[in-house]
Amino acid sequence: MAKSTISTILKNKAAIKGADVAKGVTMLTKQRMQVLEEVEKLLLVWLNEKQLAGDSVSEAMICEKARKLHSDLLQRSPSTSASSDEFKASRGWFEKFCRRSGIHSVIRHGVASSSDKAATEAYKLDFAEFMKTEGYVPQQVFNCDETGLFWKKMPNRTYITQEEKALPGHKPMKDRLTLLLCANASADLKIKPLLVYHSQTPRAFREQNVNKARLPVMWRANAKAWVTRQLFMEWLHEVFAPTVRKYLSDNQLPERCLLLMDNAPAHPPALVDDMDAEYDFIKPMDQQVICNFKKLYTKALFTRCFNVTEETSLTLKDFWKKHFNVVHCINLIDKAWEEVTPRTLNSAWRKLWPECVAEREHDFEEPDAEVVEEIVSMGKSMGLDVDGADVEELVEEHREELTTEELSELHSEQQKALLEEHSTEEEEEREEVSSDAIKSIMQKWNECHDFF
């Protein structure tokens, strides 16, 4: 080995030792700067946020975001900038990033981007022709879509949120979960939602002895609260397929259905290849839906707060800080999903499949304004400074572009949740072992007692 090479290695030994190799890299063929590893971690968080917001994402956008993250991280750690070359986010880097992260295609959500009207119209014509050729009826056609829900967050101007902002070192309440909602075009069948949280067994579950199998949602968890391919397939096999099969049988319909969904990594076009033969009556396609549900959730949340303050001695602040938990959240999700009306579900198909929409629903306007008025009225009755614009902002907040610092915080929170989850599982295992040991000791003592 050349002397100059050895000198270079010794000079950069700290950086080489500190390199955090990305998932999927089994061999360090060249130095990967730690800042680039951080870029890729935050980029995955950013991609998920885009996915939950339903935004279109292209290769160019991903590369541009990667360059911005790299620049921001260097500014936060000036000491690394001198030894770091300019990061160009080249095509080669993008392809390797996709392989390392498991992203095999550039995602575009929805039927087509809003700027491509010609492609949208062409898709509608193709869809109409497909429906006519295959002979599906509205009862057999389903749409599913996923969304992030900040389940424990009030509108920004309420005093609870303002108080949080005033506390040094305290982050705003942005505890988020991911929901997958699904219903058919005839609007007479809603499927049990899939809920993904960052904790498998939250404290509230343990305190209230919650039976997950009896929840009105399919409860799943991972550190990032993402709908992964595996979780989607579990929901498809354990919830969607048996529910739809029974529904088709009860309504004397042919055992075949069409599932339209957004083009997220968890449910790619090749999904049909992963289905067991038992579920080959499901044919997946591509589309998307959701908004009325979030306003109904917010209404249910305000109703719950109002009832507590009226019927108990708890103040809104005490209830919110010490008593409101994810078990309450699940009940509110169930209530909101139940209140999404058949008219809302059916009229959502006006643009893509107008033939399936009842004639009177073509001019149907979503009663969102009435729901917002009810939320504002309840808020004011509880002494909150809130108006319609605050409610709209809360519902749409997940669409805001997160800064590099916010992405870092979100990533840190996800990792922290994962560690806490593992710690909880270890404690439960120790408790189980301890309990078994005590039973064994007592059994031996009884044997000894009988012997003497």
Image (cartoon, grey):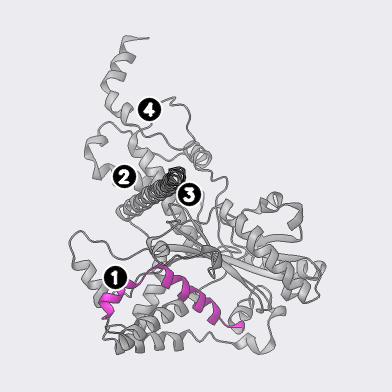
Query: Decide: marks 2, 4 in contact (CB < 8 A)?
Result: no
Measuring 31% from the left and 10% from the top, which residue is drawn there? 3
Q: CA distance from mark 4 to mark 1?
A: 48 Å
Which residue in the protein does label 3 denote?
60
Q: Identify the residue shown where x is 45% and y is 86%.
A: 371
Residue 290 appears in view: yes
- Mark 1 element type: helix
Q: What's the residue type where badge 4 is placed?
A: Gln
Label 2–label 1 contact, CB within 8 A: no
Residue 29 is situated, as x and y percent measured from the top left of the image, at 44, 24
Q: How many neighbours does mark 2 have within 10 angstroms: few (below 14), some (14-19), or many (20 or more)?
A: some
Residue 186 quadrant:
bottom right
SS for callout 3: helix
Q: Residues within 10 Å of mark 4 (few under 14, many from 20)?
A: few
Please name the amino acid that badge 2 sits on: Ser
CB atoms of marks 3 and 1 within 8 Å: no
Quick one: 326 or 355, which is closer to the camera? 326
**On the image, numbered disc 1 is attached to which residue?**
322
| CA–CA distance in space, label 3 to label 2 | 17 Å
Real-space Cα distance between discs 2 and 1?
Answer: 41 Å
Under tag 2, what secondary structure? helix
> What type of secondary structure mainly makes up the magenta span?
helix
Does 428 sit left or right of 233 as displayed?
A: left
Q: Nearer the viewer, mark 2 or mark 1?
A: 1
Say whether residue 288 is left or right of residue 49.
right
Q: As shown in the figure, which amino acid type bears the numbered disc 3?
A: Ala
> Where residue 397 sits in the image (x, y, percent)?
38, 69
Which numbered circle lies on residue 392? none
Q: Quadrant of residue 302?
A: bottom left
The Cα–Cα distance between marks 2 and 4, rounded to whole angstroms, is 19 Å
